[in-house]
Amino acid sequence: MSKPLYWERQTWPEAGETVKRTDAVIIPVGAVEQHGPHLPLAVDTLIGTAVAEQVSARTGVPVLPPVTYGVSGSHGDFPGTVALRPETLIAVMEDLIDSLHASGVRQFVLLNGHIWNNGALDVTAEKLRVRHPDSRVRALGYVTMYPGPEVNGRVQYGRGLMHANFFETSVMLHLHPELVHMDRATSHVDVDSFWDYRMDQVSDTGVWGRDVHEANADHGKAEFERCVRTTAEAVAGAVAEPWPDPTHRPGKA
């Protein structure tokens, strides 16, 4: 396909035909949360949805409207953040997948744009694998289909704390330059620590990462296109993957 297949733009008969052709969907999951003084609150939703749409265009797997709110309470006191409790996100995802399962969907890619959603989405996948044994559920980040050290984010430490950094700013300059205020960009020297902290405990600007002022659209375009390509390859292979045969297990006669 050359264009994304948007689930919500179909009629119900069209949706039924889509499920007959492919019983898979992509559900983007983002967040509305502070991204420093130079980026909009919707960064995680905007980037994750853009990747999901292009993956849909390359694979023919329909993409649903994004879940725009995420597990963002750990940003603390920065104004603007709208957060769900992990339990709430789990419940929302369960309801969405139960509804789609009733329509015949059996393969669910939960494409995450916000790292603190990971725990809730992993729990969701585990619960739904148990509830619907005829289904496959996988939660993954849009940037995780190639090795993490290859991500040029100008962040050495911090695990999930890298935020509003060189990588995200560059991708936003590629996708939505009108929403980026480079004259307000700040950087933060990341440090190593055992604990993961609330963002307002470790950064006075909400940024975690170096050299943000060097972010550029060319770098953002290259990173975005690699995210799309590697994720599309993974999804295309996933929906064609044979189901396991429970009657034949290695080591059994």
Image (cartoon, grey):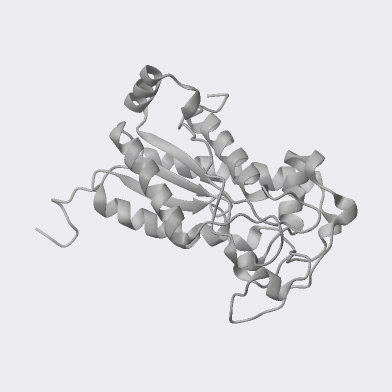
Image quarter (top left, top right, bottom left or bottom right) of the C terminus: bottom left
- In the image, 65: left or right of 251? right
Q: Is residue 109 left or right of residue 101?
A: right
Residue 40 image position (x, y, % from top left): 73, 49
Q: How many marks?
A: 0
Image point (50%, 23%), residue name: 9
Residue 6's x, y, as percent? 51, 28
**Which residue is the extreme one toward the bottom?**
194
In this rendering, the answer to whether 11 lies above or below 42 is above
Would residue 113 be found to the left or right of residue 41 on screen?
left
- Which of 37/167 is in front? 37
Specify whether 240 is left or right of 218.
left
Q: Position of residue 111 (x, y in %)?
A: 50, 47
Please identify the residue farthest to the left as the structure is shown: 253
> What residue do we see at 52% from left, 56% from top?
84
Q: Nearer the viewer, residue 73 or 43?
A: 73
Q: Is 83 located above or below residue 95 in the figure?
A: below
Task: List x then y, in percent, for residue 232.
Answer: 52, 40
Q: Residue at x 67, y 47 (%)?
A: 42
Question: Which residue is depicted at the point 76% across and 59% down?
Answer: 36
Please determine whether, in this image, residue 196 is positioned above or below residue 88. Answer: below
